[in-house]
Image: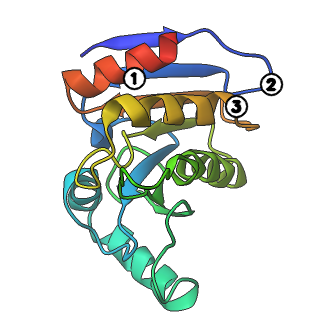
Amino acid sequence: MHSLRCPPIIGAVADITLLQGDITEQDVDAVVNAANGSLMGGGGVDGAIHRRGGPAILEECKQIRESRYPDGLPTGNAVATTAGDLPARWVIHTVGPVYAKSEDRSHLLASCHTKSLRIADELGALTVAFPAVSTGVYGYPLELAAPVAIEAVRSASTGVAEVRFVLFDGAAYQAFEEALAG
């Protein structure tokens, strides 16, 4: 597993760490799920979190859909549920934008990160693990997504002490490493 740490910036997240690995294995307060708007599970990170976390996550997602978001969670927003059987305490579900060459949706991708950190603050979470939101089936190029994610976290006003970007493969790790160094 690769690991890289960024020195703290005053007034922001105290520590940003990059790891190559499995986000479902992270012992953190909150894991961020790259969810789809239905909140009913899916492929990639979303499917892995639902499978490993068990049925308690899906049950809370159903309640959220029934009570707060009957039409689905809007892109760029975030909500929290239990983490079920995951080592984390909570899962923060966020819906990233589908990439489109014809439209700049970076503000929605940034919002996924800042709103997830806002939810983490409401929960009292001090450690949060993010995947590379929108870079799987939603098609956001890693070299474009990584700088947006890093900058959104760096500039967020939050009480979160550590953000881990847990990246599935070497290509994602490299893109985030370059963005963190930039």
Residue 182, compared with residue 97, is above or below; it is above
Q: Which residue is mark 3?
A: 155
Q: Position of residue 119 (x, y in %)?
A: 64, 55
Q: Are marks 1 and 3 in contact (CB under 8 Å)?
A: no
Which tag, 2 or 3, sits closer to the chain's start? 2
Earlier-in-chain disc, 2 versus 1: 2
Q: Position of residue 133 (x, y in %)?
A: 39, 46
Q: Position of residue 144 (x, y in %)?
A: 41, 34
Mark 1 — residue? 176
Q: Are marks 2 and 3 in contact (CB under 8 Å)?
A: no
Q: Look at 20% across and 60% down and name the residue there.
A: 51
Secondary structure state at the residue bearing disc 3: helix
Q: Between marks 2 and 1, how big is the CA–CA gap?
A: 22 Å
Reading the image, the residue beneath label 2 is 11
Instruction: Tell me which residue sits at (37%, 78%) in the image.
Output: 59
Q: Secondary structure at mark 1?
A: helix
Q: Hey, what amino acid is under mark 2?
A: Gly
